[in-house]
Image (cartoon, helix red, strand yellow):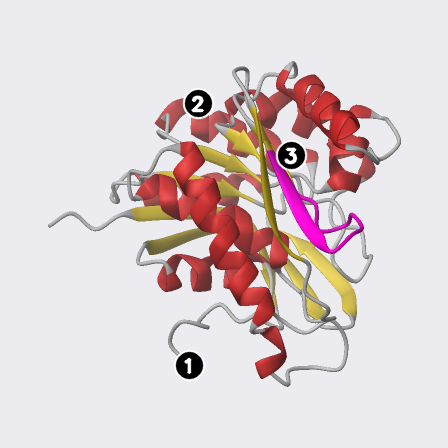
Amino acid sequence: MTTPVALTIAGSDSSGGAGIQADLKTFAALGVYGASAITALTAQNTRGVTGIHAVPADFVTAQIDAVFSDLDVGAVKIGMVAQAASIDAIAAALAHWRPRHVVLDPVMVATSGDRLLASEAVEALRMRLMPLASVITPNLPEAAALLGEPAAASEAGIEGQGRRLLALGCRAVLIKGGHGEGVESIDYLVTSESTIALAAPRVATKNTHGTGCSLSSAVAAGLAKGETLEQAVRNAKAWISAAIAAADRFGVGHGHGPIHHFHKFY
């Protein structure tokens, strides 16, 4: 029996709702063994981020090398990268180890509104990491920021931005609709062959901390288990929708509380 393994390369959330902690919870909930390489420590809770301490780039490399030299990594999820030096280190390490699947979540701003990526590092993310990605998972504001455009407000506009993001080198784009409006939250999976709209009822809750981190990790978990990209995205969408719907079972913090990663179990 081979255990599916996924590696998350991301920042730590001291309150446990997002980042590395959310990624590892997601992997565990979906039956995947999770490994991690931490790019930054954050002092963070459900109300906001009060401090960021970047991990030196050479130590980011050391963590990635330690994992790949021993574990059979089926998929990599990249989240908060914090700074350009870390992006360069991650890109070099992935070029060396050549993982089968890379899910890039271009994290720029936390749910609380706090900035998590230095503005001067956005271009490095575009140029160094996007071409390595099997799929990128921006929300509507992130997709717009990567292109230097206003946020799309229609299905045609979202698909157009997805295709312009594809032109930057990634193999697929999943644009998340959580920041949109309407009774449904619609995500769009854009590839060179097609655009697939994935809809779920929009849940009225403030407890959405870690949603983006967890969705991208769920996609990585599916890919690590051998699912196709479309299967992994569909399954991740269903799982994250249920985790958001169950979020109000928790009474954690006083701001944007976490989703319920283990809603299937308790």
| Residue 203, x across and y down, in percent | 68, 65
Report the front residue among 168 and 222.
222
| Residue 127, x across and y down, in percent | 66, 20
On whether residue 183 falls in the magenta region, the answer is: yes
- The alpha-carbon separation of the residues under discs 3 and 2 comes to 16 Å
Q: Which mark is residue 266?
A: 1
- The alpha-carbon separation of the residues under discs 3 and 1 comes to 41 Å
- What kind of element bears circle 1? loop
Give the residue drawn at x 77%, y 76%: 255
Give the residue drawn at x 62%, y 19%: 166
Quarter-of-image position of residue 143: top right
Q: Residues within 10 Å of mark 1 (few under 14, many from 20)?
A: few
> What segment is highlighted magenta in the picture?
176-188
Q: Residues within 10 Å of mark 2 (few under 14, many from 20)?
A: few
Name, please, the residue furthest toward the left: 1
| Residue 80, x across and y down, in percent | 63, 47
The amino acid type found where label 2 is placed reads Ala
Q: Which residue is mark 3?
A: 85
Q: Quadrant of the C terminus?
A: bottom left
Sequence-wise, the earlier of marks 3 and 1 is 3
Sequence-wise, the earlier of marks 2 and 1 is 2
Q: Which residue is mark 2?
A: 95
Q: Is residue 132 visible?
A: yes
**Image: 240 above or below 199:** below
- The alpha-carbon separation of the residues under discs 2 and 1 comes to 40 Å
The amino acid type found where label 1 is placed reads Tyr
